[in-house]
Amino acid sequence: MAHVAVIGGGISGVSCAGALAELGCTVDVYDRGHRLGGRLATQTLRDTGTAYDGRPVDVGASYFTVDDARFGNVVGDWIGRGLLCPWTDTFHIADGTGVIGTKIGPMRYAAPLGLRSLVEDLAGALPSDLVEIRHPFDVTGIDVGPDSVRIADREYRSVALCGPDPQMDVLVPFDHAPMWEPVLALVAVYDDRTWDFDGAFVNDDPVLSFVADDGSRRGDGAPVLVAHSTPVLAAGHLANPVTAAPAMLAVLGNLSQGGVPSWFTVKRWTYARPAHARPEVFAFDGIVGRAGDGWAGVPRTQSAWVSGDALGRAMGEALT
Ligand SMILES: Cc1cc2nc3c(=O)[nH]c(=O)nc-3n(C[C@H](O)[C@H](O)[C@H](O)COP(=O)(O)OP(=O)(O)OC[C@H]3O[C@@H](n4cnc5c(N)ncnc54)[C@H](O)[C@@H]3O)c2cc1C
């Protein structure tokens, strides 16, 4: 029975672990976070001085779309159990001065308890006799030998690196990583709902790129917006993200017509997304595998799941 380490407890790492376990491997999943989920990140509002303390809000990915059959099965199961809901197929289009139109696209899915709950659901379904989840555990070094891998005091047949290239390449170097872009996510709680959109793409604006109505995607109608910055704005404020808030709030005010929020916070994503994803679905050299949304063609949640699942199946078949 092959013993495999998975670094990363985001959706790609958890899907990889599931596929490995299905093929009979024993797996240790490492994540540095107190909770799994990675960039499917849901925080609980606290000390806001509003009625919304205790409410979850998505501060990473806003939603996802689905057109892959295998991922579609997982999504169908989540929908059937009420963990995931169709949110909207219609977003507004805005510029920095206000909303200027609408655009219909694919159905976007959102989770009433937050997108993190989906990763936690997948992890909770992993067989505990085969899979050990080790977190918070910051993996600071991996010794790769000719036919084994050592992490801290444990030895493995193989390791799967599942997450952003800049975080994984420091553990085992790899060539030709795409550029990864930063994003700031500003969460704003208002007294009232003053806007009339589910989400808005902000075009040609130096400050904001997207705004989501967290009350509509969560289904409770709370007056909460989450605004994503442009990568350029984020790059200039990574050391102290809150210094970007005045510019972000000004544009958000133009879109929401909502004035000053009762409370806000700014979350930093140094590695929010790759500028492009490699066309290959994953990489595996017989010892080290790599997966995540830097693979499988398009940088998005579905690609991360697909990439992790495909890597896990390929490793499992090669090792067992
Ligand atoms: C602001 C933002 C907006 C987004 N919007 C969308 C969207 O609208 N639609 C969409 O489909 N996708 C969106 N995404 C992308 C989506 O979140 C990702 O595609 C997906 O979550 C990637 O999952 P992953 O498992 O590959 O990586 P991650 O979720 O990043 O997981 C990697 C994990 O590895 C862990 N880790 C890293 N280094 C170590 C270490 N040394 N030791 C231990 N653990 C480690 C991290 O803690 C993390 O949990 C967005 C992302 C962000 C940040």
Image (cartoon, rainbow, N blue to C red):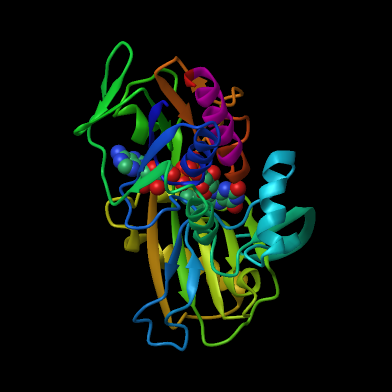
Residue 320 against residue 41 in the figure, above or below: above
- In the image, taking residue 100 as reference, residue 179 lies left or right, namely left
Which residues are drawn in magenta?
305-318
Which of the image's four quarters has the N terminus? top left
Q: Measured from the top left, where is residue 37 in percent x and y?
A: 45, 53
Left or right: 144 in relation to 306: left
The chief SS type of the magenta part is helix
Q: Is residue 99 found left or right of 45 in the rendered image?
A: right
Looking at the image, the residue that sits furthest to the left is: 153
Residue 134 position in % (x across, y down): 31, 47
Q: Picture coordinates of residue 88 (x, y %)? A: 74, 63
Can you give x and y, in whole percent of width and height, for residue 283 in the image? 50, 21
Q: Residue at x 40, y 41 (%)?
A: 8
Residue at the spot 29% in from the left edge and 29% down from the top edge? 170
**In this rendering, is residue 52 above or below 313?**
below
Foreground residue among 253 and 128: 128
The answer to whether residue 199 is visible is: yes
What residue occupies the far right of the structure in this picture? 104
**Is residue 186 magenta-colored?**
no
Q: Quadrant of residue 268?
A: bottom left
Q: Nearer the viewer, residue 293 or 35?
A: 35
Q: How many marks?
A: 0
**Residue nearest the viewer, comparing 77 with 197:** 77
Say whether residue 93 is visible. Answer: no
* Residue at the spot 61% in from the left edge and 83% down from the top edge: 193
Q: Is residue 312 magenta?
A: yes
The residue that appears at 33% across and 62% down in the rendered structure is: 243
